[in-house]
């Protein structure tokens, strides 16, 4: 198990690879896995002048918008600048509404500085703005600011709520139903927390829709080994890009109610809906509109500053809205997060801009709206370009990218390629992705990192490279695939 360097010093160290938490060894996170590590090495090799058939690595493996050239939204950065460096209040070039937002945030900070710890659930005025945002989004349905917990990205909120439910029930491990394919934060956290992953397959033949029969099947299977407690739904979907219909959401809510599951609605892509005819419906709104008994169900819904049009991944802002949680449980949750002190105040400030953006008549309104729309329009075009291009390649089939930031096409690989992968000791899709990286510099994530039906092969690419780069990437991809087919035919 231990590497040579580790075993040489074994006598001096108390901690070895054999006595750390085994759950950490089990967990995997494909979006930053071995393929990405290899991409980093290739980048270094290129920097040092190595000769390769390409000049750069194109990182299409991770939903990191700014890393792929998306410009920040000016208003957000002005507010962030002001709260971090108050002398900027004297700068006449910064508009009054940005200054007013920044003043409001600083007034909520202890000592008037973002350098102070905030309440563990976040700065109260920002929690109130989040509740007002949710209420506006959901057509006036009430949102209580005390049910809003600010977090380090959505990940922070998802992990703390999963931690709350990670105890055995009647001697069985707590089970979490997650979509397959899924976003690997879920499989990784389930492994880390020693919970039981219960996968339900999304229906590729129906634009990655969610079939209730399949949910029932997975629950029956899951109950044999675990006590299912949580149903995770990602809408719009990562890696699959689907946007659930209202009808489908109602069916899911009824199912969760019948089976006494806590709903985790991962809605971080709520601003990223592209296909005409598709619309984002929040689980909270649908649940409340369905009335009794559904409007009493426990729901945790997650949102992030990392996605949408802002793409501020590195600043780490997000929130969880917890609905209908028993007050005693909510108190325990607050106790639990208090041990982590607080999410970053920079993340909270960015979230404030997202939920309290410039309004018509304010000086920043026009520029803000233009910048936001440019990003979303361009993502819409790129979503269409990617799906259409993949569908034009022999052996590829790709569902429309209705929302989010990814395409997840299926590839049919010839038997000889499957044999070569086996010889190489890799799953076939991983083998394919490594070949693609070595020959073109394009870094994608093999479908096995997200889960897929046995015997099928997929990969995930983001739609985030800027348009010209994306066109270049798709061209390289097509040529690579043709050569790959030639080689293994
Ligand atoms: C579906 C989904 N949920 C949650 C996250 C976590 O994002 P963050 O922690 O940056 O908000 C991501 C990131 O890609 C995601 O795709």
Image: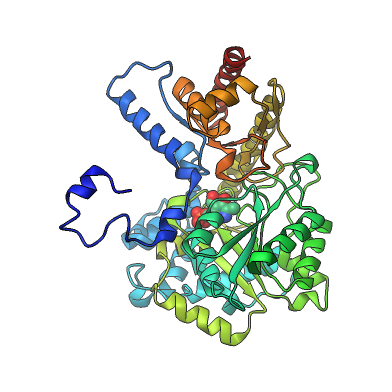
Colour scheme: rainbow
Above or below 151: residue 387? above
Occupied quadrant, residue 322: bottom right
Instruction: Decide if residue 91 is on the left or right side of residue 141.
Output: left
Instruction: Decide if residue 78 is on the left or right side of residue 229.
Output: left
Q: Please, which residue is most extreme toward the bottom here?
A: 328
Residue 147 shows up from this direction: yes
Above or below 99: residue 73? above
Occupied quadrant, residue 395: top right
Query: Residue 385: where, in percent of width, then height?
Result: 67, 29
Q: Residue at position x 67%, y 79% from top?
A: 324
Above or below 222: residue 242? above
Q: Quadrant of the C terminus?
A: top right
Looking at the picture, tell me which residue is in the foreground, 210 or 146: 210
Query: Residue 410: where, in percent of width, then height?
Result: 67, 33
Residue 282 shows up from this direction: no
Looking at the picture, tell me which residue is in the foreground, 407 or 69: 407
Instruction: Decide if residue 111 is on the left or right side of residue 405.
Output: left
Q: Residue at position x 42%, y 50% from top?
A: 93
Looking at the picture, tell me which residue is in the foreground, 86 or 305: 305
Query: Residue 121: where, in percent of width, then height?
Result: 48, 74
Total of numbered circles in the picture? 0
Query: Residue 101: where, in percent of width, then height?
Result: 49, 64
């Amino acid at each position: 198990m231990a590497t040579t360097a580790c075993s040489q010093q074994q006598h001096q160290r108390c901690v070895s690879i054999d006595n750390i938490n085994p759950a950490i060894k089990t967990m995997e996170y494909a979006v930053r896995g071995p393929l990405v590590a290899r991409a980093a090495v290739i980048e270094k090799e290129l920097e040092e002048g190595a000769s390769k058939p390409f000049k750069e690595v194109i990182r299409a493996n991770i939903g990191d918008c700014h890393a792929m050239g998306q410009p920040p939204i000016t208003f957000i950065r002005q507010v962030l600048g002001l709260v971090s460096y108050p002398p900027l209040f004297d700068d006449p070039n910064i508009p009054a509404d940005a200054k007013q937002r920044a003043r409001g945030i600083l007034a909520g900070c202890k000592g008037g500085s973002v350098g102070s710890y905030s309440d563990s659930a976040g700065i109260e005025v920002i929690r109130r703005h989040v509740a007002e945002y949710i209420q506006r989004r959901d057509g006036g349905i009430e949102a209580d600011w005390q049910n809003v917990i600010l977090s380090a990205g959505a990940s922070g909120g998802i992990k703390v709520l999963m931690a709350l439910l990670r105890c055995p029930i009647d001697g069985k491990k707590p089970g979490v139903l997650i979509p397959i394919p899924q976003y690997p934060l879920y499989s990784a956290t389930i492994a880390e927390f020693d919970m039981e992953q219960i996968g339900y397959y999304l229906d590729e033949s129906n634009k990655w829709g969610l079939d209730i029969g399949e949910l029932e099947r997975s629950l029956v299977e899951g109950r044999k080994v675990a006590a299912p407690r949580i149903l995770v739904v990602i809408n719009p979907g990562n890696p699959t890009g689907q946007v659930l219909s209202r009808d489908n959401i109602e069916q899911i809510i009824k199912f969760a109610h019948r089976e006494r599951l806590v709903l985790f609605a991962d809605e971080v892509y709520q601003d990223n809906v592209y296909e005409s005819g598709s619309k984002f419906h929040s689980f909270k709104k649908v649940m409340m509109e369905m009335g009794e008994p559904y409007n009493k169900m426990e729901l945790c819904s997650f949102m992030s500053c990392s996605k949408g049009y802002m793409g501020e991944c590195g600043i780490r802002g997000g929130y969880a809205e917890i609905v209908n949680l028993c007050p005693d449980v909510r108190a325990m949750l607050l106790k639990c997060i208090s041990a982590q002190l607080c999410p970053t105040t920079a993340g909270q400030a960015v979230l404030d801009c997202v939920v309290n953006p410039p309004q018509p008549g304010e000086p920043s309104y026009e520029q803000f709206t233009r910048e936001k729309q440019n990003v979303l329009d361009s993502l819409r075009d790129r979503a269409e370009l990617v799906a259409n291009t993949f569908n034009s390649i022999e052996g590829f089939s790709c569902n429309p990218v209705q929302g989010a930031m990814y395409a997840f096409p299926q590839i049919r690989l010839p038997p000889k390629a499957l044999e070569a992968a086996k010889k190489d000791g890799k799953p076939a899709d991983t083998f394919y992705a490594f070949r693609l990286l070595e020959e073109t510099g394009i870094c994608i994530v093999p479908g096995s990192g997200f889960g897929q039906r046995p015997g099928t092969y997929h990969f995930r690419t983001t739609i985030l490279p800027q348009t010209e780069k994306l066109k270049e990437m798709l061209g390289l991809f097509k040529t690579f695939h043709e050569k790959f087919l030639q080689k293994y035919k």
